[in-house]
C-alpha cells in the first residue's frame, strides 16, 4: 500500500480518476441518448473489466468499487447495484486474465461480452423481483448487451496504455 503513493503511481491513480470521471460523464450525458429499442449502451462493466485485466485483483476491484459508488449515486433507480456488481466483474476479469487468457483486445471483448450480459441479467432480475415476468425482458437483455459492445471497445485502450508490461510478467 505504501508504494501506491509514490510519484509514478500517483500519476497513474490520477489518470484512472480522470478515466473514471470521463466514463461516468459519457455514460450519463452522451450514451443515454443513444437508444436502440429502448435500451441504452452500458460501458461501466467494460471499464471495470479493462481495469481489472490490467491492474490485477486488488487495484482493479478497488477502482471498480469507487466507480460503482459514483455510478449508484448518478443512477436513481439503483441503490447499491453497481457498487456490488462492478468489483465482482473486475475481480473475475483479473483472475481470468492472470491465469487463463491473454490481455489482448479480442480476449477483452470476450470478457466484456460476458460482463455486459451478466450486468443486464442482474438488472433484469432486479426488475423481475419487483414486477411480473415478461418475455420482453429477455430481448431487452440481448439488445442491451449487443448494443453496448461497440461502445465498450473504447474502454480497452486507456488501461492498456497506462500499464507497463514489466509488472505483468510472472516470476
Image (cartoon, helix red, strand yellow):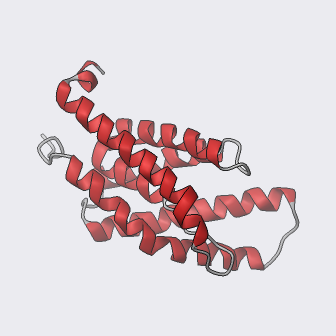
Measuring from the top left, give residue 13's x and y in whole percent.
31, 35
Task: Indicate the quadrant containing the C terminus: top left, top right, bottom left or bottom right.
Answer: top left
| Count of residue discs | 0
The reply, left or right, for residue 42 in relation to residue 17 is: right
Q: Give the residue drawn at x 44%, y 45%.
A: 21
| Residue at image location 74% in from the left, 73% down from the top | 137
- In percent of width and height, residue 165 lies at 14, 48
Identify the residue shown where x is 30% and y is 21%.
1
**For residue 143, which quarter of the picture?**
bottom right
Vertical position of residue 128 compared to residue 59: above or below: below
Residue at 48% x, 66% y: name it.
114
Q: Residue lying at the far right in this picture: please name it.
A: 132
> Does residue 71 appear left or right of residue 159 in this picture?
right
- Point out residue 59 in the picture as x, y percentages from the top left corner: 36, 36
Residue 22 seen in this snapshot: yes
Q: Nearer the viewer, residue 32 or 2?
A: 32
Query: Is residue 160 toward the left or the right of residue 40 in the image?
Result: left
Q: Is residue 139 left or right of residue 42?
A: right
Decide if residue 95 is in sight here.
Answer: no
- In the rendered image, the vertical position of residue 137 relative to residue 83, given as above or below: below
Q: Quadrant of residue 150?
A: bottom left
- Give residue 31's position: percent from left, percent from top: 54, 66
Amino acid at each position: 500500500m505504501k508504494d501506491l503513493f509514490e510519484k509514478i503511481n500517483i500519476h497513474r491513480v490520477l489518470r484512472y480518476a480522470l478515466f473514471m470521471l470521463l466514463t461516468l460523464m459519457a455514460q450519463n450525458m452522451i450514451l443515454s441518448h443513444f437508444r436502440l429499442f429502448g435500451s441504452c449502451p452500458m460501458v461501466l462493466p467494460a471499464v471495470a473489466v479493462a481495469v481489472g485485466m490490467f491492474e490485477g485483483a486488488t487495484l482493479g476491484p478497488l477502482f471498480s468499487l469507487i466507480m460503482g459508488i459514483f455510478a449508484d449515486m448518478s443512477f436513481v433507480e439503483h441503490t447499491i447495484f453497481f457498487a456490488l456488481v462492478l468489483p465482482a466483474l473486475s475481480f473475475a476479469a483479473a483472475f481470468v486474465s492472470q491465469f487463463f487468457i491473454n490481455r489482448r483486445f479480442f480476449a477483452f471483448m470476450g470478457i466484456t461480452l460476458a460482463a455486459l450480459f451478466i450486468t443486464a441479467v442482474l438488472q433484469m432480475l432486479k426488475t423481475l423481483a419487483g414486477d411480473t415476468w415478461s418475455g420482453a425482458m429477455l430481448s431487452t437483455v440481448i439488445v442491451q448487451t449487443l448494443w453496448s459492445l461497440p461502445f465498450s471497445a473504447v474502454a480497452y485502450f486507456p488501461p492498456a496504455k497506462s500499464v507497463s508490461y514489466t509488472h505483468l510478467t510472472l516470476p
